[in-house]
Image: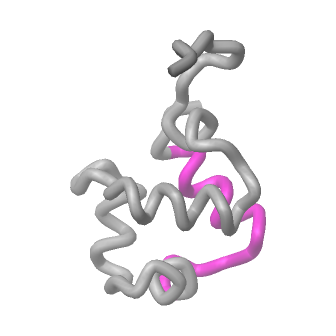
Amino acid sequence: MTHLEKLKALRVDKDLTQVQVAELLKISQITYSQYERGKRALPIEHLKTLCSFYGVQSDYILGLPKGLDYPER
């Protein structure tokens, strides 16, 4: 499943419309639709909001593999 499919699947699993998610993000439905279709990049602040709302990590939405090692700082 691609990151775009995951973004849509999270919304559908919660029985939400694009309008409802767009309202959460304070954007238009058209802009949100462009995120789901890959016509516009999802800004980091919206990614953070969606991760908190859906209860998932950003790696899931971004389609990154599980178990990545991150450098410690």
Residue sitting at 34 percent across and 83 percent down?
27
Q: Residue at x 49, y 37 (%)?
A: 62
On screen, residue 41 above or below 64: below
Which residue ends up furthest to the left in the rendered image? 39
- Asked which quadrant contains residue 6, the reply is top right
Residue 27 belongs to magenta span: no
Where in the figure is residue 31, as x and y percent of width and height?
29, 73
Left or right of 63? Residue 51 is right
- Could you tell me residue 53's position as x and y percent? 68, 68
Residue 13's x, y, as percent? 76, 62
Nearer to me, 30 or 21: 21
Q: Main secondary structure of the magenta part?
A: helix
Instruction: Please name the residue shown 52% across and 58% down the image.
Output: 48
- The outermost residue toward the front is 73
Q: Is residue 8 left or right of residue 52?
A: left
Left or right position of 68 against 34? right
Q: Which residues are magenta?
A: 5-19
Query: What residue is shown at x 54% (from left), y 30% (from top)?
Result: 63
Looking at the image, is 65 positioned above or below residue 57?
above
Q: How is the image coloured?
A: one colour
Image height of 47 relative to 12, above or below: above
The mark tally for this picture is 0
- Image quarter of residue 66: top right
Residue 15 lies in the magenta-colored region: yes
Q: Is residue 44 above or below residue 23?
A: above
In which quadrant is the N terminus drawn?
A: top right
